[in-house]
Amino acid sequence: MTKNYTSFTSESLFRLLQKDDSSAFEELYNRYWHELFIAAYKRLQCREDAEEAVQNLYESLWKNRHKIHIRTSLENYLFASVRYIILRMMQQKLLLPAFSDGNVDAYCKPDRSTEEGILINDLSRHINQLVDGLPDKCRKVFELSRYEMKTHKEISTLLSISEKTVENHITKALHLIKNDLNHFFFL
């Protein structure tokens, strides 16, 4: 009997992925591929490059599944990771014309995995501080929505507030976080 992975949370799937469950990986791939592709395409404006960026992300996710430690949500991690991949791709495109004489092999690309890991950890820590600084009700709604992946309806039932109030709290939290994070992302 096979498991129905569609009902699993992303975090549960990631834990299974870390135990080498390829079906969990496939479900994560199916669950996020399209959204990640759209995000990459918006920045790269090229279908092939966007597909390559998302493919690189999933390849890295599989290769590094035992080393990755996610402190926020898997979704946040995936979207932050694809942004870093896009930045690298854009950087490479800017550097390649400098080597248009055909001597690209002479260029040695530095390993930035440690630097990227530090940036991701710093970003996660900063987002956690921002979330902790939100007003109590707003923070609770945001955490239920983004960390526990609850729907607006589920949150409104849990907290005995209207769905519109849930939406307002999430909008407020995202606005505050986005405004504070403008210096992290320039895309």
Image (cartoon, rainbow, N blue to C red):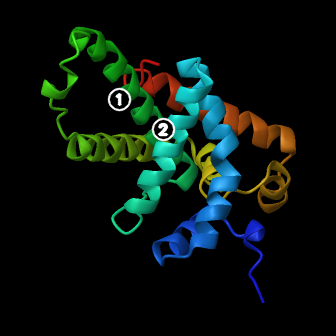
Q: Determine whether 157 is above or below 7 in the image.
A: above
Q: Which residue is mark 2?
A: 82
**Along the line of sight, which residue is nearer the eye, 162 or 174?**
174
Of the two numbered discs 2 and 1 on the same chain, state the one appearing first in sequence: 2
Residue at x 52%, y 70% (from the top left corner): 17
Marks 2,1: beta carbons within 8 A: no
Whether 185 is drawn above or below 74: the answer is: above
Residue at (53% x, 54% y) in the render: 73
Residue at the limit of the structure toward the bottom, as seen here: 1
Amino acid under disc 1: Arg
Q: Is residue 37 left or right of residue 185?
A: right
Percent position of residue 185, x then y: 42, 24
Where residue 91 appears, x then y in whole percent? 32, 21
Q: In the image, is 131 to the left or to the right of 136? A: left
| Three-letter code, disc 2 | Val
**Disc 2 element:** helix
Q: Position of residue 33 (x, y in %)?
A: 65, 45
| Residue occupied by mark 1 | 88
Residue 124 badge = none
For residue 34, what is the image quadrant?
A: top right
Residue 114 seen from this side: yes
Residue 87, image quadrant? top left
Q: Residues within 10 Å of mark 1 (few under 14, many from 20)?
A: some
Tell me what residue is drawn at x 52 percent, y 44 percent: 55
